[in-house]
Image (cartoon, helix red, strand yellow):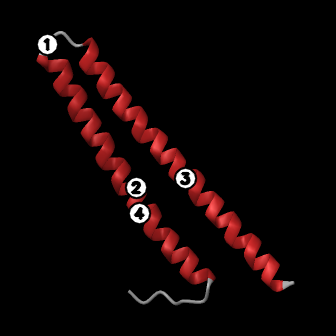
Amino acid sequence: MEKKKSDIKVLLMRLVFMVIGVGMGLLAGMGLGKFLKAIKESSGKGPALAGLIAALLWFAAALILSTVLHEAGHLVMGRATGYEFIS
């Protein structure tokens, strides 16, 4: 019976992290969409450059957040399976 509880726990954790991953992908896609819209609507170089900078900053923030969440997933699942945090 204990194995089924553990399996459900692992399944729920995977589901949570999959939802987070999909959300991060959607947010990154929204940033790209804003950038492409800014390029399409801009008549000069200023708005397009601002859109590019905003998209790059959005991408950097999404990359950092997704990396932190990814590594936290390793920590959580490692702790859940009995490993100890060393460094």
Residue appearing at x 37%, y 48% in the figure? 62
Indicate the position of residue 45 as horizontal and vertical percent values. 12, 18
Amino acid of disc 2? Leu
Measured as percent of width and height from the top left, residue 4 is found at 81, 78
- Vertically, is 28 above or below 30? below
Q: Is residue 82 left or right of residue 74?
A: right
Is 82 rendered above or below residue 77? Answer: below
Q: Which residue is mark 3?
A: 20
**Image x and y of residue 20, in percent:** 55, 52
Q: Which of the two discs, 2 and 1, labels the residue nearer the N terminus?
A: 1
Q: Quadrant of residue 56?
A: top left
Q: Nearer the viewer, mark 2 or mark 3?
A: 3
Q: Amino acid at mark 1?
A: Gly
* Labels 1 and 3: the sequence-earlier one: 3
For mark 4, what is the residue? 68
Give the amino acid at mark 3: Ile
Q: Residue at x 65, y 59 (%)?
A: 15
3D distance between C-alphas at marks 1 and 3? 37 Å
In three-dimensional space, the C-alpha distance between marks 2 and 3, rounded to whole angstroms, equals: 11 Å
Q: Regarding mark 3 in the picture, which secondary structure is present there?
A: helix
Label 2 crowding class (10 Å Cα cut-off): few <14, some 14-19, many 20+? few
Quote the CA–CA distance across marks 4 and 3: 12 Å
| Dot 4 and dot 2 residues touching (CB under 8 Å) | yes
**Mark 2 — residue?**
65
**Residue at 18% across / 9% down in the picture?**
43
Q: Secondary structure at mark 2?
A: helix
Which residue is tagged 1? 44
Tell me the number on the disc at residue 14.
none
The amino acid type of the residue labelled 4 equals: Val
Crowdedness near tag 1: few (<14), some (14–19) or many (≥20) residues, C-alpha within 10 Å: few
In percent of the image, x 57 and y 82: which residue is there?
79
The alpha-carbon separation of the residues under discs 1 and 4 comes to: 37 Å
